[in-house]
Image (spheres, rainbow, N blue to C red):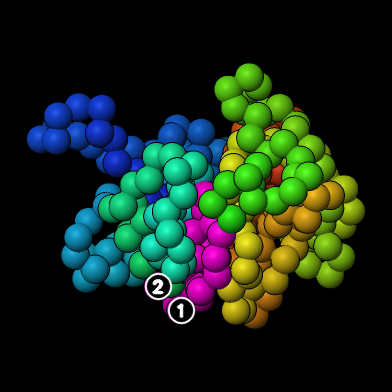
């Protein structure tokens, strides 16, 4: 039986409030399906008991990409550079990640998902790479480039769980983010960085599988077996 992998939704406010919905991009669902997982969309419920009930039925959690996390969750004042803050999503994802880590449920974070993982466990973020990190590389290649465009390299650290999956050393990645992990949360370790020092992957060495990458492997699995192995690992451990 295919393992059930939960994906928290984001708010869709393109319609009047009474018609708004909860959404997940198809690419995450299709990528999980391609590697043998069954995606389960998690709505942004208010009731934590209901969320816990959903988690009890899951075999793993994928925290997807998206907009910025409200900086109040990591003790900072909001920058004017923030975009697409979704407070219900922040609340639910932070709760889900803490619950999953405490329960030793396998977790994969993608882009925003890395930032959620770091904040949920007590870390902090750079709210805007271009204005906060001198001489930073370009990390956001939207909208000029397609989702599979390889914008820069990340260097994967030897001896990490990520290195077991994709190999240590340089890895070309797609990049569509303007925020990044700053202070790393207790219990997490840096698994990859860009040449400018921006953190590109985090993991929890003492958990069964808690890995987060700043790039988007779901857009690369058809062309790069290493990217496919990241998603396969989540499904394998969840099984």
Q: Residue 124: say if magenta.
A: yes
Residue of label 2: 99
Look at 50% across and 73% down and name the residue there. 121
Residue of label 1: 102
Decide if residue 21 is on the left or right side of residue 112: left
Report the magenta residues as a range: 99-125
Decide if residue 119 is on the left or right side of residue 12: right
Residue situated in front as seen by the camera: 42 or 19? 19
Q: CA distance from mark 2 to mark 1?
A: 5 Å
Look at 14% across and 29% down and name the residue there. 16
Q: Dot 2: what SS?
A: helix
Q: Residues within 10 Å of mark 1 (few under 14, many from 20)?
A: few
Look at 36% across and 67% down and name the residue there. 95
Residue situated in front as seen by the camera: 159 or 86? 86
Can you give x and y, in whole percent of width and height, for residue 107 in the image?
A: 53, 62
The image quarter containing residue 162 is bottom right
Can you give x and y, in whole percent of width and height, for residue 169 in the image?
A: 89, 53
Can you give x and y, in whole percent of width and height, for residue 119 in the image?
A: 50, 65
In this view of the protein, can residue 115 be seen by the observer?
yes
Q: Dot 1: what SS?
A: helix
Residue lying furthest top in this view? 144
Q: Are marks 2 and 1 in contact (CB under 8 Å)?
A: yes
Look at 28% across and 35% down and name the residue there. 12
Residue situated in front as seen by the camera: 202 or 163? 202
The image quarter containing residue 4 is bottom left
Decide if residue 159 is on the left or right side of residue 217: right
105 lies above or below 201 = below
């Amino acid at each position: 039986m295919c393992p059930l992998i939960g994906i928290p939704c984001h708010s869709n406010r393109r319609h009047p409030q009474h018609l708004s919905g909860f959404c997940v991009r198809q690419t995450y669902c299709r990528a999980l399906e391609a590697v043998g997982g069954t995606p389960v969309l998690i709505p942004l419920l208010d009731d934590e008991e209901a969320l816990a009930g959903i988690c009890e039925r899951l075999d793993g959690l994928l925290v997807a990409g998206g907009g910025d996390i409200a900086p109040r969750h990591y003790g900072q004042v909001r920058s004017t550079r923030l975009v697409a803050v979704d407070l219900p999503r922040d609340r639910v994802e932070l709760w889900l990640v803490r619950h999953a880590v405490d329960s030793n449920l396998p977790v994969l974070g993608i882009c925003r998902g890395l930032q959620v993982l770091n904040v949920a466990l007590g870390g902090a973020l750079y709210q805007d790479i271009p204005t906060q990190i001198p001489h930073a590389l370009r990390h956001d290649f939207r909208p000029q480039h397609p989702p599979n465009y390889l914008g820069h390299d990340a260097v994967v650290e030897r001896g990490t769980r990520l290195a077991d999956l994709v190999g240590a050393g340089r890895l070309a990645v797609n990049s569509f983010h303007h925020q990044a992990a700053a202070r790393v949360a207790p219990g997490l370790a840096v698994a990859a960085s860009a040449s400018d020092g921006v953190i590109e992957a985090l993991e929890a060495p003492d958990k069964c599988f808690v890995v987060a990458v700043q790039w988007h492997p779901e857009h690369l699995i058809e062309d790069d077996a290493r990217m496919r192995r990241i998603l396969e690992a989540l499904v394998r451990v969840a099984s």
